[in-house]
Amino acid sequence: MIGFFIIIILGIFISYGLKKSRYDKSNYKKESGNSYWGVMMDKGKYGEYLSFNALEKIKGEHRILTNVYLPKENGETTEVDLVYIHETGIYVLESKNHSGWIFGNEKSKNWMQTFQNGQKEKFYNPIWQNKTHIKYLIKSLKIDEMIVKSIIVFSDRCTLKKLEVHSDNVKVINRYDLKKTIEKIINNSPKVFEGGKIIELYYELKPYTCADKDVKEKHIEKIKEKQDLRFNNKDTY
């Protein structure tokens, strides 16, 4: 019996070692600087990690950046979860780790998350949220908005029940459809960047990644202030 438990424990340690080693060698670790446990214990970061891995498998010259803190005119920052720079354009990903059923309309300020017990929660329209990210990305890179695509990626734990999306350059999907969705866009899009330009854009954005603790805390503080404002103002819902 003791030998059996020793084998199980050894198996657990070996599995952990292999997963951690794979993570430490990953490009996501190099780009984000996040620790293994920092990602595994955070649903948001883990979701970004999974999306990053899916993007890496797509063919064609590309570069990927994560957690890009772009400056705004008022001194604040806007955080982009993932930026995928490909031969066919720039794909800006907003990652959502909701569960339950998701209802939303591109034109509505708030969307709805419904749980099995009937509980409902409103959340800010992620298309609008990503539109802000794209606005400052375009401003930073000085590029044409026509080559930028907005991809809203929900976790596989939720069901996209009823969504109304009208813009051609916006996709709202579950993570399991990420690779297939972007590949479909790529197959129907012309090549707009050469390899040298992709690298140039990557290094223009790179200084805005791996933000220090002060930048992250200020960013989170501003988000909380805006959330409190929306909560206290019934007209915003």
Image (cartoon, helix red, strand yellow):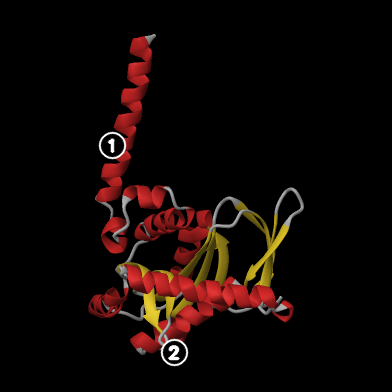
Residue farthest right in this picture: 118
127 on left or right of 61:
right
Q: Are circles 1 and 2 on residues that touch, CB within 8 Å?
A: no
Depth check, front residue: 35 or 166: 35
Q: Secondary structure at mark 1?
A: helix
Question: Residue 65: horizontal and vertical position, in percent?
Answer: 34, 68
Q: Secondary structure at mark 2?
A: loop
Examine the rendering and report whether any part of residue 4 can be seen.
yes
Q: Amino acid at mark 1?
A: Gly
46 on left or right of 167:
left
* Residue at image mark 1: 17
Mark 1 or mark 2: name the one nearer the start of the chain. Answer: 1
Q: Amino acid at mark 2?
A: Asn
Mark number, residue 74: 2
Mark number, residue 3: none
Question: Residue 197: horizontal and vertical position, in percent?
Answer: 26, 80
176 on left or right of 165:
left
Question: Residue 128: horizontal and vertical position, in percent?
Answer: 58, 78
For mark 2, does the 10 Å Cα neighbourhood hold few (<14), some (14 to 19), or many (20 or more) residues?
Answer: few
